[in-house]
Image: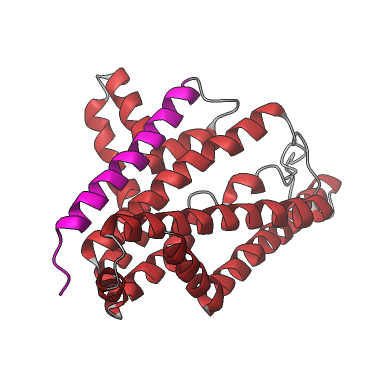
């Protein structure tokens, strides 16, 4: 396992893709902060009457860096998938996986090493965005409530969701073993959101609707982001995401062990 991890980390940090996506994440944090800054300037001009013919009370619309902390949460799986998913798929395209098996590595260890590296990518990108918001958001906008207890807890609650999403990305890329799996992995959150309207069929069953929202990673993320405080069923939500991570990993290993590498 150690050699597999060392090789995967070497490939990860040697390639340009990891750093390009990292730069995009930091750049997005900076651009968001600038956008909010100019919107605040516009609101200030409206309130002061500098804009002729515009009469609106925008005193309550000042934007702080607090909201930036959650702005990239729903798009982060896409960026994680671009780096980690493509790293896995390239292994199959280059027959590297077959070579690893030939020299004695087990398929289980290969899968787990891919998962560990992918989860590492997730943590690095999450940390990079968080630090970028602290720096750019703090300097340009300032914070209002952060670091309040509720915001800190909700930030921590997003990590199990990202962990589950990353595990699903690894599952799809390892199972399909091609670019199709990669494409499906990075578009999965958006596909789920498109079909989330099906929850309307459960409008007479509020408990079932609530459980479905909490059990689907992208929908749970929306609950966390849209919550004024800590979600009521925070512990249950974490357990669900851990369960998805474990189930998808065990299922992925079983399928990978039985698959035929052509």
Q: Residue at 51% of width from left, 67% of height from top?
A: 9
Q: Residue at 40% of width from left, 55% of height from top?
A: 115
Which region is colored magenta? Answer: 233-262
Q: Where is residue 97 in the image (x, y as percent from the top left)?
A: 29, 71
Check residue 256 for magenta coloring: yes
Side of 169 where 79 appears, left or right? right
Q: Nearer the viewer, residue 67 or 113?
A: 113
Looking at the image, what colour scheme do you see? Answer: secondary structure
Res 238 → quadrant: top left
Q: Residue at 29% of width from left, 67% of height from top?
A: 104
Q: How many marks?
A: 0
Determine whether 175 is above or below 159 in the image: below
Res 26 → quadrant: bottom right
Q: Which of 179 and 94 is in front in this view?
A: 94
Residue 101 seen in the figure: yes
Residue 42 seen in the figure: no
Side of 50 where 121 appears, left or right? left
Q: Nearer the viewer, residue 99 or 192?
A: 99
Q: Residue at 45% of width from left, 58% of height from top?
A: 118
- Quadrant that contains the N terminus: bottom left
Side of 235 where 209 appears, left or right? left
Q: Position of residue 139 (x, y in %)?
A: 83, 54
- Quadrant that contains the C terminus: bottom left
Determine whether 131 is above or below 30 in the image: above
Check residue 255 for magenta coloring: yes
Q: Position of residue 174 (x, y in %)?
A: 28, 61
Q: Position of residue 6 (x, y in %)?
A: 50, 67
Q: Main secondary structure of the magenta part?
A: helix
């Amino acid at each position: 396992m150690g050699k597999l991890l060392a090789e995967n980390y070497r490939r990860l940090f040697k390639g340009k893709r990891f750093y390009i996506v990292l730069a995009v994440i930091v750049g997005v944090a900076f651009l968001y902060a600038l956008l909010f800054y100019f919107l605040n300037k516009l609101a200030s001009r409206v309130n002061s009457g500098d804009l002729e013919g515009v009469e609106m009370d925008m005193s309550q619309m000042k934007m702080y860096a607090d909201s930036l902390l959650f702005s990239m949460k729903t798009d982060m799986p896409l960026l994680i998938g671009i780096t980690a998913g493509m790293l896995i798929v390239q292994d199959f395209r280059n027959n590297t996986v077959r070579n690893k098996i030939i020299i004695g590595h087990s398929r289980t260890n290969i899968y787990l090493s891919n998962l560990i590296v992918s989860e590492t990518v997730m943590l690095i990108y999450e940390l990079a965005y968080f630090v970028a918001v602290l720096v750019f958001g703090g300097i340009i906008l300032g914070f209002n409530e952060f670091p309040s207890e509720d915001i800190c807890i909700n930030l921590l609650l997003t990590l199990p969701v990202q962990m589950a999403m990353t595990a699903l990305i690894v599952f799809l890329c390892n199972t399909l073993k091609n670019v199709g799996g990669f494409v499906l992995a990075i578009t999965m959150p958006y596909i789920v959101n498109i079909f989330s309207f099906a929850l309307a069929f459960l409008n007479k069953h509020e408990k079932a609707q609530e459980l479905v929202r909490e059990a689907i990673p992208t929908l749970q993320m929306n609950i966390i982001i849209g919550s004024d405080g800590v979600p009521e069923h925070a512990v249950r939500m974490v357990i669900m995401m851990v369960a998805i991570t474990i189930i998808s990993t065990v299922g992925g290993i079983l399928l990978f062990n039985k698959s035929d590498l052509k």
